[in-house]
Amino acid sequence: MSALWKSSLWFTFAAWLVSCATPGSRFSTGRDVWGHRPGPKGFSTVIIDAGHGGKDNGASGKFTGQLEKDLTLDMARRLRAELSGNFTTILLRADDTFVDLDERVMRANHYGDAILVSLHFNSGQAHIRGPETYYWRVDSHGLAIRMQRAMSATCPAENANRGIVRRRLRLTRNPEIPCVLLEGGYLSHPLESHLIATAAYRQQLAAAIAAAIRTQAAMGDAGTGPLPPPLHAPPSRPTDTRE
Ligand SMILES: [Zn+2]
């Protein structure tokens, strides 16, 4: 075997090894397990996750009688309408059905060149109100900042910005694409729950979230501040934390 032949054989073998360690599809489709990279720019697909559904009601508004699962589905439809024309949109559930969180992650991972936005409403002590945004991956930080800014600007209450929270949840850690989980306000707050109960307010929220997504697609992370440090942590499991 000539030296040249040997070296080309070795090169082929090495290239195969590399392709096994980091499957080409992960990069060619825009998917990345860890997400230790800047936020997305120019993506074409938005995966919209209406939180809860079916047997899982989520939070319930004791002042309005509304269920979180119905409100998140309504928000998902509004967001899809706001984004149509600019993006391909995928709804992880389009009706009142139960979809396990791991199943949602698996479905989201079919797509590359995409972001995942999970929609929720919060519940807590009666005096707490305001939107909140959860993220975990480095490549989701800019998106989280934009989402939180957009929701806070829509929310009329002073001091209603509860900010962004870096938390390892199944829908913030496990997807292989940039992902954020939005809490659009507190169903447990007497005033905020009545606000959330109005279609006009939900429409405003959806429009603001859509505008933030368009800005992220156009500008990437520009203007969202420094990236957070990369963290290595195992995927989130059902037993890890409240979701
Ligand atoms: Zn929820």
Image: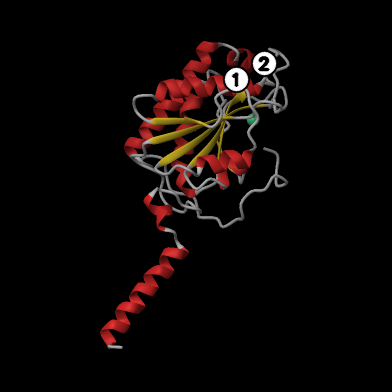
Where residue 111 appears, as percent x and y from the top left, is: 45, 42
Where residue 6 appears, as percent x and y from the top left, is: 32, 83
Tell me if label 1 and label 2 are in contact, CB under 8 Å. Answer: yes
- State the residue position of label 2: 66
- State the residue position of label 1: 71
- Depth order, front residue of 122/78: 78
Query: Any mark on residue 212, and which?
Result: none
Label 2: which secondary element = loop
Q: CA distance from mark 1 to mark 2?
A: 7 Å
From the Cβ of disc 1, is ligand 1 less than 8 Å away?
A: no
Q: Identity of the amino acid at label 2? A: Gln
- How many marks the image carries: the answer is 2
Q: Identity of the amino acid at label 1? A: Leu
Residue farthest to the front?
1
Question: Who's the residue at 68% across and 12% down the image?
Answer: 64
Label 1: which secondary element = helix
- Depth order, front residue of 112/117: 112
In which quadrant is the C terminus drawn?
A: top right
Residue 154 at least partly seen: no
Q: Earlier in the sequence, mark 1 or mark 2?
A: 2
How many other residues sit within 10 Å of disc 2, few (<14), some (14-19) or many (≥20)?
some
| Left-right relation of 156 to 39 | right
